[in-house]
Amino acid sequence: MDAARILGVGEPASVTADVGVWVPRLTGTATVGAGGTAFNLDQDLSVQSSAPGVAGEFAVTVDRWRFGGLGFEASTSGTGAAPSAGNFGGVAIAAGDAVRGSYSSWMAGAEVGYVVWRPFADEPWPWSDPGDNRARAEAAIGRNGRPLVDLQVQALGGVMAFHYAQTVENLTAGGTADFDRTAFCVYGGGGLDLRIGMDGRIPLIQDLRLYGNAGIGGGWPGADSVWMIRVGIAAMVDEHVGIEFGYRLFDFTLVDGPSQVDAGLRGLFGAVSLRF
């Protein structure tokens, strides 16, 4: 049989990219400065609104290996009345004071993945021999030569640079303070990727891709923890282009002397999905 009709045999290197809009909401707490108050970021510091940012990732897949990059940029600001009193970086805030708050954040990273289990492929495990799963691998290819079903479970690892900046201004009494931190992090995790071929059964949709990835790590300086989740579904309208919807979560704990921000960015993600 033609190798192209056997899942996992004779597959060329491929490139994928997902670039789109992420609409995260900032939650968590910030304690800034000696004797600072643990403020709720969204409720107390006027950054409760969600604003569109940019997020994306790309990957080059060769055999079981996946090499790629990922990143995002997000920011927002707002003004409101402080619901409680406290101190942010030396700026005293009384209940009812008009407060302007803002944050900005970006992340850029590189990621490596390795497929540890691909149950419908000719060689499901890294130690499998060619032909160990031949009958299932042949049945997994549709009439159009594309996979009917392909599940891949991966081990993931990566490095990233992450930046977070927070500014608070008391418009009533005066005073401005900020928190600004850039950290370099290492993380590990896992993921799964499921592709379901329509084989001509649904007009305008070649196949569906459902995926979920998670990672956890830490870094220097002062990145006590970072962890992220990326999940989504993409509908490919032809062999190369699709529309993707999903959810992104990026949680972090940053420390700088007496200051600590324990926060998370989370929200819906929409993108164009490219595959070559």
Image (spheres, rainbow, N blue to C red):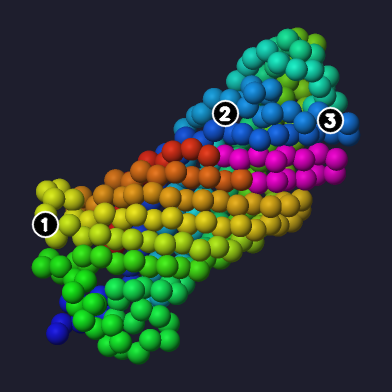
Of 65 and 73, the residue lying toward us: 65
Q: Which badge, 3 or 2, is on the more N-terminal residue?
A: 3
| 275 left or right of 101 in image | left
The image position of residue 120, as x and y in percent, is 29, 73
Report the magenta residues as a range: 252-265
Rendered image: mark on residue 76: 2
What predominant SS class does the magenta segment belong to?
A: strand
Q: Quadrant of residue 84?
A: top right
Q: Which badge, 1 or 2, is on the more N-terminal residue?
A: 2
Rendered image: mark on residue 36: 3
Q: Quadrant of residue 105?
A: top right
Q: Which residue is at a point 60% across and 20% down the rendered structure image?
A: 78
* Magenta run includes residue 122: no
Amino acid on which disc 1 is placed? Gly
Of 150 and 17, the residue lying toward us: 150
Q: Can I make out residue 237 in this image?
A: yes
| 139 left or right of 35 in image | left
| 6 left or right of 232 in image | left
Amino acid on which disc 3 is placed? Gly
Q: Which badge, 3 or 1, is on the more N-terminal residue?
A: 3
135 over 81 or under it: above or below: below
Q: Which residue is at a point 38% across and 61% down the rendered structure image?
A: 193
Q: Which residue is at a point 53% across and 39% down the rendered structure image?
A: 266
